[in-house]
Amino acid sequence: MPHPTVRGYVLLGVAAATYLAARLVGTWELYLFAFAFLAIVVLAWLSVAATGRRIRATRTITPEQPVAGDEPEMSFSLKNASFLPGPELTLRSPLVGLSTDDLEFEVGSLAPRGERAIKTHVARVNRGVHVLPATEARAEDPMGIARSVHKVSDTLVVTVLPRITPLDSCALFPDLGLKHDWSGRHGLRAFGASEFRGVRPHQPGEPLSHIDWKSTAKTGILMLREMEEPAGADVTMLLDGTAARLVGRLPETNFELAVRAVGSVADYVLRSHRGVSLLCHERNWRQVRLTADGGGRRALLQVLAETRPDAAAPLVSALRRLRKDGSYQLRAQSITLVGISLDQELASTLIRLREDGGRLAFLYIDGTSFAPGVAEGSSALLPFLPAAQQPGTTLSTEDRSLLLSLSAAGIPCLTIARGDDLVRTLTLWRPGHTGRAAAAK
């Protein structure tokens, strides 16, 4: 429903004052002026009422599924369905959660039955599935006397995919995927160990963890136990979404970094022709099976776009459920936990899972680095290094102690902090290996 603006109320006041003056003075010309001022307000109100609600808008975003951090283009297609000239329009499109600032701009008047297309860029978008409220149009008459605000479009659902980092190797899976020798020239296929296949001579660049020392002692050369995974074996990844452990403000939070890390590692596993079982610890526990093809990668991005850090229960409850209901999964698959939680109870549960035969790895997102005033990239390091070799780390003494206990129990651990380069942190073959290999030759 239209209503007068400040200018309209002033004009109504002038009309009322003129009418009172006419009553007091008794001059009929003043009555004409009073009714003229009132007529202007009424006509402005009628014009806005007649044309304001005949404006329709359609919103689209390009690309339809942007990646976090992109600045996509949003298009508005406006149409005046009235046979009268449209009012002066100002559009406001709320971007709740999608970006920092809402879109607001002046459009002007549309011709009768006219259309207009407007394009603008959105500031950097945040990961997630965002339901944008309807676009609001503020319609005014040309003199700015009457105004109405109403919705001119439907709601818009925008899915923003996470930004993942392509990895050529992964420190959490040293035996998986296509590896390179120390010179970086030759590709060698490495096998994830699960079933014994045979013994063969060791090739440069292959991991030393599978050396068969008895055969090496007999032959005098390094011999490797060749292993292979059972057919169809998956890699299980568990993403911690404990709400109480969330630190930081969008888009810089420990959970957003955890999503990027999970996506990067899972994408690497899928490209290595292995399936992924993705477990999301959130309000409604989810488990998604991802196949090693293009569909699996698309499903990975979609699931990570939808996940939210809203789990009320601590991560330990999810691990206990896994220990109780997923005993086969523990024995048959390797499990990588990407956590924003770390305490004594969690560490004890992980150690018990390891003692039960689970093959675990723990990727800890250092929430302390997201606190205000902490420099970026201050704890991109392996947690089993002594504290003296960790200059500038934000890890507390308790966190270092817990991570050391996990490493001592045979659980590989990595730590990532805000501002860390995921390639340098997660990649197995890092800059400098080639130089050491050349020196060894």
Image: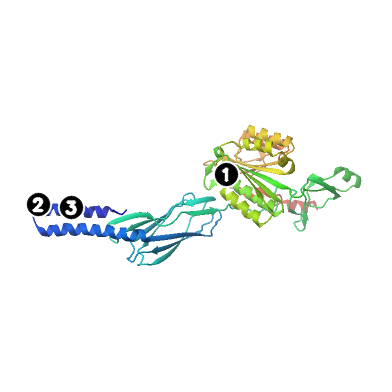
Type of the residue with mark 3: Ala
Query: Is label 1 in contact with label 2 (beta carbons under 8 Å)?
Result: no
Which color scheme is applied?
A: rainbow
Mark 1 falls on what kind of element? helix
The answer to whether residue 34 is visible is yes
Question: How many residues crowd mark 1 within 10 Å: few (<14), some (14–19), many (20+)?
Answer: many
Type of the residue with mark 2: Leu
Q: Residue at x 35, y 54 (%)?
A: 149
Task: Identify the disc placed on residue 392.
Answer: none
- Along the polypeptide, which appears first: circle 1 or circle 2? 2
Q: Residue at x 75, y 37 (%)?
A: 357
Q: Residue at x 68, y 38 (%)?
A: 325
As rendered, which of 118 and 87 lies closer to the eye?
87
Question: How many residues crowd mark 3 within 10 Å: few (<14), some (14–19), many (20+)?
Answer: some
Mark 2 falls on what kind of element? helix
Task: Identify the disc placed on residue 24.
Answer: 2
Residue 180: x percent and y percent?
A: 75, 55
The answer to whether residue 412 is visible is no
Query: In front of the other: label 3 or label 1?
Result: 3
Judged left or right of residue 179, residue 8 is: left
Vertical order, 148 against 111 (above or below): above
Task: Identify the disc placed on residue 255.
Answer: 1
Residue 18: x percent and y percent?
A: 15, 54
